[in-house]
Image: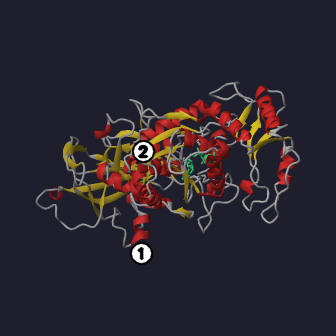
Amino acid sequence: MINFVQQEIENDLKAGKYTEGIHTRFPPEPNGYLHIGHAKSVCLNFGLALHNGGLCNLRFDDTNPTKEDVEFVDSIQEDIKWLGFDWGDRKFFASDYFGKFYDYAVELIKRGLAYVDDLSAEEIRAYRGTLTEAGKESPWRNRSVEENLDLFTRMKAGEFPDGSKVLRAKIDMASPNINMRDPVIYRITRATHHHTGDDWLIYPMYDFAHPLEDAIEGITHSVCTLEFEDHRPFYDWLLESLGFDVNTRPRQIEFARLDLTNTITSKRKLRQLVEENHVRGWDDPRMPTLCGLRRRGFTPAAIKDFCERIGVAKSNSVVDIAMLEHCVREDLNDSADRVMAVLDPLKVILTNVDDGVEYLTAENHPKRGGSRFVPFTREIFIDREDFMEDAPKKFFRLKPGGEVRLKYAYIIKCNEVIKNTAGEVVELHCTIDPTSKSGGATAGRKIKGTIHWVSAKFALPAEVRLYDYLLTTDAQGNLPEDFIAALNPNSLIVKQALIEPSVRWTNAGTHYQFLRLGYFVVDPDTTPDKLVFNRVVGLKDTWAKVKDR
Ligand code: ATP
Ligand code: MG
């Protein structure tokens, strides 16, 4: 693992800091499902711990009482485990530290570094100043320590209505960094918390709670995204003010968040997609949530590989989603068995084949080998796309009078095209060249095209779900402001397909390459009577092409 965060850790160790070992944390707020952006943070935090022989905590940052849920706490753990990381017995809830946060706030007051302010939220905003103008001090800023202690105790006891008072850090209203202009650290909110119930009427602000959570857990490196860079001075001020030793206390390091083309990575927007039923749920295979990607057939190995390849940068950029697709394609190319399925069946009658069945040997995987039998019969189905009536010269699949090879089987010739009254092609009559059997003596006869097929008698019906990006972008690849308007109406196409019988006893989560069509995974909607597949990705690797250019 070589990235600038690791470099910083090594510098710290060389400087004699953190002699007790490296300790990181992944701190999700349980207000949504984890998405691909979180995966980057999970891989980085757990990865740094692994690389340095240290530890990584899972900490639910549940200091905000109003929008959190147990459903999310459970899903987050499931998703991290699925990625293959382990927090051991170090699963924590920030809300467990509410008592400690309160004590630290009291300590700040005692040190003359915090005060109770009676200004309204609006007034506080007006007094804060701007980027070019200094802020103004609150008239309540110079209350005595005794008065502040008394008022803060009474805030906790519920003597004042919501929003009537706040506790603020006393730093510098003229600081060029607005985050240092006496930030609010506690507010009064009568809300039921999913973990602490109605125990608390006052809640700490994120910027106050987070450094303390880190310090309480003995975190050494608090890795977060770039938008917190301007908050770092307060992070350091708080720990310094409370007397934490600079050689052991946590330090915050910011990295660039992951943004992906065609992809939403805002929890609020993902929630909107679910709540307004634009998708089938958090685990809809079109969602960039980890449970959605899992159902779609993305593998932990592919996601981790992707996170490693994109690296860790200090400035934000947008990563092409084709790169993530490239990673899963590489993984599945190695692991997925090959089978034949037909998505748009067109019947072919092989007029010189008898009614029986011939079992042909088909290779499961080009590298790992293994084989199975596929039944070959007089009636088969091919994909409609592989036949063209008025074919251009370069069309090397089936056309009237033309020849093509059936994979693992024979070369066939198209003699007759049968149409319905509407003029649509409904059936082809072909003959096989019996001397051209794959692996046989004359099998080497030169022929340009090879297509996949299934036996009409033995093929199994299967519902195949083909996905496209949930969002369409403009020519520059940007998402419009109104992302609901950018929803792609063709993001899900369902095909009633036919698949070779070897997959009859398959299980949800099993991957296959459908020859020539892409990588697919068995969906959990599969029942003993009905096979359901999701297309993970097609075979065409646009990322590999970009790379080669
Ligand atoms: P919110 O908008 O609700 O704050 P969030 O995306 O920050 O959402 P958190 O649950 O706070 O979600 O995130 C947990 C951790 O994951 C944080 O440390 C955060 O920095 C990191 N993280 C979130 N989104 C991304 C992203 N797109 N890329 C990298 N890391 C991310
Ligand atoms: Mg956050």
Relative to 323, is 95 above or below?
above
**Mark 1 within 8 Å of ligand 1, using the beta carbon:** no
Q: Dot 1: few (<14), some (14–19), or many (≥20) neighbours within 10 Å?
A: few
Mark sitting earlier along the chain (1/2): 2
* Residue at 65 percent of width and 47 percent of height: 241
What amino acid does circle 1 point to?
Answer: Arg
What amino acid does circle 2 point to?
Answer: Glu
Quadrant occupied by the N terminus: bottom left
Look at discs 1 and 2 and give the one toward the viewer: 2
Residue 299 visible at all: no
Left or right: where 171 falls relative to 526? right
Relative to 287, is 257 above or below?
below
Q: Dot 2: few (<14), some (14–19), or many (≥20) neighbours within 10 Å?
A: few
**Mark 2 within 8 Å of ligand 1, using the beta carbon:** no
SS for callout 2: loop
Q: Quadrant of residue 102?
A: top right
Q: Nearer the viewer, residue 449 or 146?
A: 146
Is label 1 in contact with label 2 (beta carbons under 8 Å)? no
Q: Which residue is tagged 2?
A: 20
SS for callout 1: loop
- Determine which of the numbered discs, if any, sits on residue 549 in the image: 1
Residue 20 visible at all: yes
Q: Nearer the viewer, residue 409 or 293?
A: 293
